Image: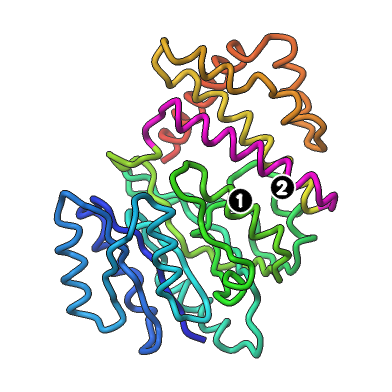
């Protein structure tokens, strides 16, 4: 089994060495890592060139469009590995943990389509890590096990927490939707709807950096809210057509995320908030029906108090949660 690692690179000169240095030790002679170049204005391209010259497995590719999705697609077109791993260039991995997981995969006679793991949040301000635990110490197989890990209302759709079998992605034409936010939600929905052989294992290797200045995730715009809401609605609609235990669990998870996005209304300038409120005007059709008890309660709250007040309440809760997290770390 050989591995292809796809790393989009755009204005990350302060973080790229930590990312690449954590990956290189796991690479065998037949593995490859693609540094997909955007139009950086810092030293990211020069750093990428340095790593390409230093390690034979490292290759620079200039993307043929713009954005994260396009960069990942360029990497997918170039990749030749049996398995695919996506890494964001401002994040890094636990080298030893991933190395052990890859060795387990290399010992298999037949590779699964998707390998899912837990991950860490790495807080830039303190340098501390916090594990996001859904799988825990268990080893689970099959889509029908998804409801067992989706009970804590935490993110499950980030593509970097998974390792994908390349032929599975090719067979089902699983490229990323370009020029939009929430591409991971859309991608994960389409991956699961393609009925993969799914393994969930206790091997948290990915460290997701929180608090990086200049990160797209730190900024809120009306277009970001609209595109996220649109993709969540679309994904929920697709999954409702399946009618299985695992699809109901995914719907509940996306409905909860839809509700959390209400808080983004308060992060917009005052003159754009009413436009954002309109984006949620069909909230009832999106979060109902649901099998998630919390979603059901919030739906009643919105019905009683309206979208604007609910957005303010959720923004306050979000602020208090982040304040507690900072104190804890």
Residue segment shown in magenta: 218-245
Asked if residue 236 lies in the magenta stretch, the reply is yes
Give residue 312's quadrant in the image.
Answer: top right
Q: Position of residue 162 (x, y in %)?
A: 55, 64
Q: CA distance from mark 2 to mark 1?
A: 9 Å
Q: Which mark is residue 25?
A: none
Q: Position of residue 113 (x, y in %)?
A: 64, 73
The residue where tag 2 is placed is 250
Name which residue lies at 43% across and 75% down.
Answer: 79
**If the image is split into quadrants, where does the C terminus sit?**
top left
Proximity of marks 2 and 1: CB atoms separated by less than 8 Å: yes
Q: Position of residue 299 (x, y in %)?
A: 74, 22
In the image: residue 213, left or right of residue 192? left
- What is the number of callouts on the image? 2
- Local SS, label 2: helix
Q: Position of residue 179 (x, y in %)?
A: 44, 45
Asked if residue 183 lies in the magenta stretch, the reply is no
* Front: mark 2 or 1: 2
The residue where tag 1 is placed is 156
Name which residue lies at 39% across and 65% down.
Answer: 74
In the image: residue 150, left or right of residue 260? right
């Amino acid at each position: 089994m050989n591995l292809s690692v796809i790393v989009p690179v755009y204005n990350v000169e302060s973080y790229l060495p930590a990312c690449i240095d954590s990956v290189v030790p796991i690479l065998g002679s037949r593995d490859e890592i693609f540094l997909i170049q955007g139009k950086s204005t810092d030293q990211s391209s020069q750093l990428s060139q340095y790593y390409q010259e230093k390690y034979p497995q490292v290759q620079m590719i200039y993307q043929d469009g713009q954005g994260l999705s396009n960069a990942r697609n360029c990497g997918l077109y170039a990749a030749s590995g049996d398995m695919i791993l996506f890494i964001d260039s401002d994040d890094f991995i636990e080298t030893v943990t991933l190395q052990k997981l890859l060795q387990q995969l290399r010992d298999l006679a037949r590779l699964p389509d998707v390998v899912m793991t837990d991950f860490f949040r790495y807080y830039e301000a303190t340098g501390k890590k916090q594990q996001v635990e859904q799988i825990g110490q268990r080893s689970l197989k099959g889509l029908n096990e998804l409801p067992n890990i989706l009970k804590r209302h935490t993110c499950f759709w980030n593509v970097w927490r998974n390792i994908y079998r390349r032929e599975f992605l090719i067979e089902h034409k699983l490229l990323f939707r370009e020029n939009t936010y929430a591409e991971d939600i859309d991608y994960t929905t389409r991956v699961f709807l393609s009925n993969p052989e799914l393994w969930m294992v206790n091997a948290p290797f990915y460290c997701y950096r929180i608090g990086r200045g200049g990160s797209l995730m730190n900024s809120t715009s009306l277009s970001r809210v609209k595109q996220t809401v649109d993709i969540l609605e679309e994904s929920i609609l697709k999954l409702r057509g399946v009618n299985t235990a695992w699809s109901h669990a995914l719907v509940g998870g996306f409905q909860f995320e839809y509700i959390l996005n209400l808080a983004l209304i308060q992060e917009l300038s005052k003159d754009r908030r009413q436009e954002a409120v309109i984006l949620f005007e069909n909230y009832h059709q999106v979060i109902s029906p649901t099998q998630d008890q919390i979603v059901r309660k919030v739906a009643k709250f919105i019905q009683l108090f309206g979208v604007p007040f609910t957005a303010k309440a959720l923004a306050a809760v979000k602020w208090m949660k982040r304040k507690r997290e900072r104190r804890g770390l």
